[in-house]
Image (cartoon, rainbow, N blue to C red):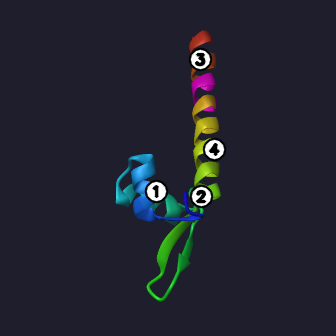
Amino acid sequence: MPRFLTLADVCELLQISSAQAYALVRSGELRAIQVGGRGQWRVEDVKLEEYIQASYAKTEKMVADQRTQARHT
């Protein structure tokens, strides 16, 4: 895999729409840089992996919190 990915690459890898990928970048949830005269977005492969790992951790916490709430109701 190349070091830098286009947003189209990110869309394909995560199986999301271009609007979703752009929203992730614009919100800062997925770190990216703008390069070139046209300001094309690029996502470093390690930043994509960090985003994926953070998403796993966020999901695990959400599931654990839901289990805790279910036990207390």
- Residue 21 located left or right of residue 48: left
For badge 3, the amino acid type reads Arg
Main secondary structure along the magenta-highlighted residues: helix
Using the image, determine if residue 20 lies above or below residue 6: above
**Marker disc for residue 10:** 1
Q: Position of residue 12 (x, y in %)?
A: 39, 52
Query: Which circle's residue, 3 or 2, is located before the other in the chain?
Result: 2
Q: Are marks 3 and 2 in contact (CB under 8 Å)?
A: no
Report if residue 62 lies within the magenta region. Answer: yes
For badge 1, the amino acid type reads Val
**Magenta residues (range):** 61-65
Q: Residue at x 59, y 37 (%)?
A: 56
Q: Residue furthest bottom?
A: 37
User: Which residue bears the numbered disc 2?
Assistant: 45
Q: Position of residue 13 (x, y in %)?
A: 45, 50
**Marker disc for residue 37:** none
